[in-house]
Image (cartoon, rainbow, N blue to C red):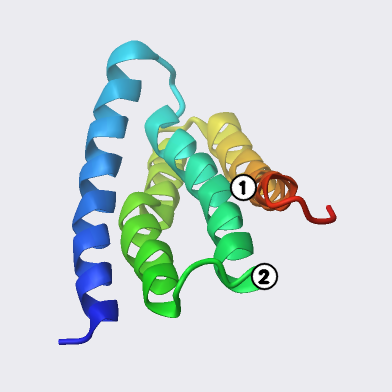
Amino acid sequence: MSLRLVYIAIFGVTGVLARYYFGLFVEKHFHSPLPLATFCINISGAFLIGIVYVFGIERSALSIDLRVGIMVGLLGGFTTFSSYCLEAVNLSEAKEIMYALAYLGISPLLGFASTFAGMILARKLLGGEL
């Protein structure tokens, strides 16, 4: 078994468990008609993938195996696009159309902005250009 597969497996389990426990935390402490746990997970995952992209691809500060392990394993296990889609459908079926549309619109926009912010932060930390 290659080191890359080991990283994907270990980080994948870590990402899944992080998603589970982070989701429990958000649901316990924040009450909203929106699926806030999945929303927060997707936005933070988008931010983190921006950081990993800069460190791993732009600056080659991570080995390819480690970068793939983090991006595919950790962040793949952590982020939840399929849950996002299902929850939007569930909101629609519950006749919460405005919440469904808001959720569908805000998540990708903030995901995009968070990815960009993560890349800017990583570049700044590395002393490079923005």
| Residue 92 shown left or right of residue 129 in the figure | left
Look at the picture and state if 32 lies above or below 77. above
Residue at the farthest bottom position: 1
Disc on the earlier residue, 1 or 2: 2
Look at the picture and state if 95 lies above or below 119. above
Residue 63, image x, y percentages: 44, 74
| Residue 116 shown left or right of residue 44 in the figure | right
Q: What numbered label is drawn on residue 111? A: 1
Q: Quadrant of residue 2?
A: bottom left
Q: Are marks 1 and 2 in contact (CB under 8 Å)?
A: no
Q: Residue at x 48, y 48 (%)?
A: 45
Residue 42, image x, y percentages: 48, 45
Q: Residue at x 47, y 34 (%)?
A: 40
- The front one of 2 and 118 is 2
Q: Residue at x 33, y 57 (%)?
A: 74
Residue 65, image x, y percentages: 37, 77
Q: Total label count?
A: 2
* Label 2 packing within 10 angstroms: few (<14), some (14-19), many (20+): few
Residue at the farthest left position: 1
Amino acid on which disc 1 is placed:
Gly
Label 2 sits on residue: 58
Q: Image quadrant for the N terminus?
A: bottom left
| Residue 66 shown left or right of residue 126 in the figure | left
Residue 23, image x, y percentages: 30, 32
* Label 1 packing within 10 angstroms: few (<14), some (14-19), many (20+): some
Amino acid on which disc 2 is placed:
Glu
